[in-house]
Image: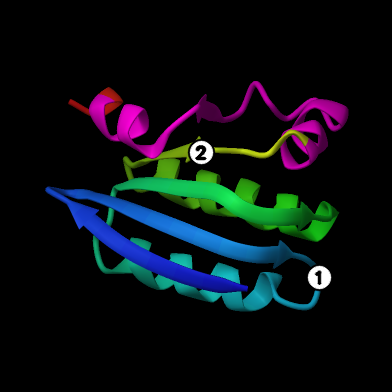
Amino acid sequence: MKINIDKDGDVFICRLKGEITFSNSPELRKSFIKLIDEQARKLILDLEKVTYMDSSGLATLVEILQKLKSSGGQLKLANLQEMVKSVFEITKLEQMFEFYPEARQAVESFK
C-alpha cells in the first residue's frame, strides 16, 4: 500500500495504491490519524488504484470517518473501482460515505 498526499487549499487528497488489507490497515490507520491530529478536516481518499479491500480495510475507513466527524471534519471517497465499491454495497455501508467519480468533484463539493 502506497499513499501519496496532495493538498488543494485546505483539502487533503490522499491517493492510495495497492490493496487495503489486514496486513496494512494499521499503517493506513496510523497515517490518517496523524493527519487528523495535525488538524486536517477535509480528506478525500482517491481509491482509483486500490485493487482490493477486505473487511479490515473497510473497518479502517469507518474508523477514519468517525474520527474525522468527531473532530468536525469530513471524509469523501473518489474513483472507486467496481470491485472495491461492491464491498461497501455488500456491507450496506455505502450510506455512511460520500462517493464521487473523480477527486476533482470531491474537492469542489467542499466549496
Position of residue 78 measured from the top left corner of the image (x, y, whole percent): 49, 37
- Residue type at mark 2 is Leu
Magenta-colored stretch includes residue 2: no
Q: Farthest residue toward the right?
A: 90
Q: Residues within 10 Å of mark 1 (few under 14, many from 20)?
A: some
Residue under numbered circle 1:
22
Q: Which mark is residue 38?
A: none
Q: Which residue shows up at 73% across the image and 55% down it?
A: 51
How many marks the image carries: the answer is: 2
* Front in this rendered view, residue 104 or 20: 104
Q: Residues under labels 2 and 1: Cα distance?
A: 20 Å
Does residue 47 sit above or below 6 in this rendering? Answer: above
Position of residue 46 measured from the top left corner of the image (x, y, whole percent): 48, 48
Rendered image quadrant of residue 96: top right
Q: Quadrant of the N terminus?
A: bottom right
Q: Which residue shows up at 24% across the image and 60% down it?
A: 39
Q: Is residue 81 left or right of residue 29?
A: right
* Front in this rendered view, residue 36 or 108: 108
Q: Identify the element where label 1 is drawn.
A: loop
- Magenta range is 83-108
Q: Is residue 38 left or right of residue 102?
A: left
Position of residue 74 measured from the top left corner of the image (x, y, whole percent): 38, 38
Q: Which mark is residue 77?
A: 2
Position of residue 95 measured from the top left corner of the image (x, y, whole percent): 65, 21
